[in-house]
Amino acid sequence: MLYDDEEQPVAADDAIRDGGLCMGVDLSGRKTDGIIGYRAHANPQAVDLNRIDFYDPLEFWEPIRARNRDAYILEANRFHILVSKERIRVPPALAAEMSVYDVSAGEIRTHYAGFFDPGFGFGDGGMLGTKVVMEVRAREVPVILYDGQTLFTVRLERLTRRPERIYGADLGSSYQHQTLTLSKHFKRR
């Protein structure tokens, strides 16, 4: 269910902990032209959710560039967008939810929505996963993150039956092939 950037499956022994799939953060910038994430500007204008591909991302976000080290310090009480190291593939008979991995790692919140519909990263069966874009905030104190560090686990739930329509299969699903990206409300550069 997890794949790396070379489309190789991640071994279950490396991914499964306490009944969940562990997923890490990609701070390499290798597949994103050196950008490892985005840091929100303080007090930007409100976003009208009906406007798609409308807002200039630089009015809301500061791109974070990879440095010559494998770590990044999350500023306290700042909202960040980061991307997972692995790609996840949720089969149509399952749904999934992002959950906290290790509360002792720091006062950090790694999700605000955190649900994966049946078929996310699966499509018609030929996809080998989709990156997870994370909404991340460190609370009260800065937190240092390392490339590949596990930030969350994915808990799977078996459905009582397969849905008639799955995520990404002829639905126009916005995030089926995402990499490090902002929401559909922002113009693509």
Image (tube, rainbow, N blue to C red):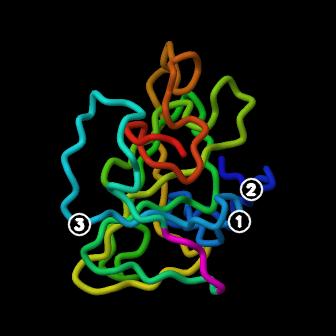
Q: Amino acid at mark 3?
A: Ala
Real-space Cα separation, disc 3 to disc 1, in angstroms: 28 Å
Stretch of the chain drawn in magenta: 64-68
Mark 2 or 1 closer to N-term?
2
Q: Is residue 164 magenta?
A: no
Q: Amino acid at mark 1?
A: Arg
Q: Which residue is mark 1?
A: 30
Residue 188 vs residue 167, the one in the foreground: 188
Pinpoint residue 136: horizontal percent, then vertical percent: 37, 65
Q: Is residue 28 left or right of residue 48?
A: right
Q: Nearer the viewer, mark 2 or mark 1?
A: 1
Pinpoint residue 171: horizontal percent, then vertical percent: 51, 18
At 56% from the left edge and 83% from the top edge, which residue is drawn? Answer: 71
- In this rendering, the answer to whether 84 lies above or below 65 is above
Pinpoint residue 106: horizontal percent, then vertical percent: 35, 82
Q: Nearer the viewer, mark 3 or mark 2?
A: 3
Q: Is residue 19 left or right of residue 68?
A: left
Few, some or many residues within 10 Å of mark 1 (<14, 14–19, 20+): few
Residue 38 vs residue 112, the one in the foreground: 38
Q: Which residue is mark 3?
A: 42
Pinpoint residue 185: horizontal percent, then vertical percent: 37, 38
Mark 3 or 2 closer to N-term?
2
Few, some or many residues within 10 Å of mark 2 (<14, 14–19, 20+): some
> Are dots 2 and 1 in contact, CB under 8 Å?
yes
Few, some or many residues within 10 Å of mark 3 (<14, 14–19, 20+): few
Q: Amino acid at mark 2?
A: Asp
Label 3 sits on a secondary structure element that is: loop
